[in-house]
Image: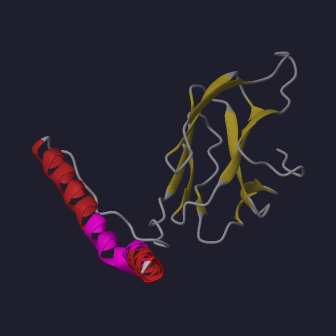
């Protein structure tokens, strides 16, 4: 009799083990993932409602692979004297926009560079609707010392300042300052 009881016990344990595997299988938890996702969405919704009360915007989360719209890049160079200062811009492919050979060269596709300001104070501007990363080279050409300010409104941009001018008042030669990526061939 003990022998038959042992086999019933073994069958009972095996049935219990199979039931546990069935309950713990990923197929059994499939409904839990949607419940967790719905809970997370409700939590975000509550946070957005709180933000609306504080008059701040609440954006919908972008899905995987969603790309952000391009942030236009507007670069403005100004200075505080009658000096001749030039703005040269280079993209990551070494294309150039700025003064070259006495004329404005717009070598960066889709971007525009303003005219060359030779009588001082600026501004000289560079506008790129695609917002690509660029480097800047600001060149002193002639005239008195100048405090220059370059402002970049694009992603990763900022406000940069420098003092440019002749190192010896009897010699008016070019000095320059650069920010961001500049190819080795960049020069004034």
Q: Residue at x 54, y 66 (%)?
A: 130
Foreground residue among 62 and 132: 62
Counting from the top left corner in percent of width and height, residue 97 is at 70, 58
**Residue 93 to residue 52: above or below:** below
The type of colouring in the image is secondary structure
Foreground residue among 40 and 142: 40
Q: Residue at x 83, y 33 (%)?
A: 174
User: Is 29 contained in the magenta span?
Assistant: yes
Counting from the top left corner in percent of width and height, residue 157 is at 56, 44
Left or right of 16, for residue 55: left
Quadrant occupied by the N terminus: bottom left
Left or right of 34, for residue 171: right
The stretch in magenta equals: 20-37
Say how many tags the image has: 0
Quadrant occupied by the C terminus: top right
Q: Residue furthest left?
A: 53
**Residue 111 to residue 162: above or below:** below
Left or right of 10, for residue 48: left
Counting from the top left corner in percent of width and height, residue 51 is at 18, 46
Counting from the top left corner in percent of width and height, residue 13 is at 43, 74
Instruction: Kindly report the secondary structure that dominates the magenta region of the rendered protein.
Output: helix
Kindly indicate the quadrant of the structure image that contains residue 172: top right
User: Is 166 contained in the magenta span?
Assistant: no
């Amino acid at each position: 009799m003990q022998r038959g009881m042992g086999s019933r016990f073994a069958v009972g344990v095996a049935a219990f083990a199979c039931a546990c595997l069935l309950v713990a299988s990923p197929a059994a938890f499939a409904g839990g993932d949607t419940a967790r996702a719905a809970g997370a969405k409700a939590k975000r919704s509550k946070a957005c409602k709180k933000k609306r009360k504080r008059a701040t915007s609440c954006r919908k989360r972008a899905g995987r692979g969603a790309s952000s719209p391009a942030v236009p890049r507007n670069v403005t160079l100004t200075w505080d004297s009658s000096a001749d200062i030039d703005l040269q811009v280079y993209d990551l492919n070494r294309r150039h926009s700025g003064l070259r050979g006495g004329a404005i060269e717009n070598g960066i596709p889709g971007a525009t560079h303003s005219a060359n300001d030779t009588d001082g104070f600026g501004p000289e501007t560079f506008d790129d609707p695609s917002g690509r990363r660029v480097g800047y080279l600001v060149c002193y050409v002639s005239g008195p010392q100048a405090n220059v300010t370059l402002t970049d409104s694009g992603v990763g941009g900022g406000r940069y300042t420098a003092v440019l001018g002749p190192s010896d008042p009897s010699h008016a030669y070019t000095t320059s300052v650069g920010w961001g990526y500049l190819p080795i061939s960049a020069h004034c």
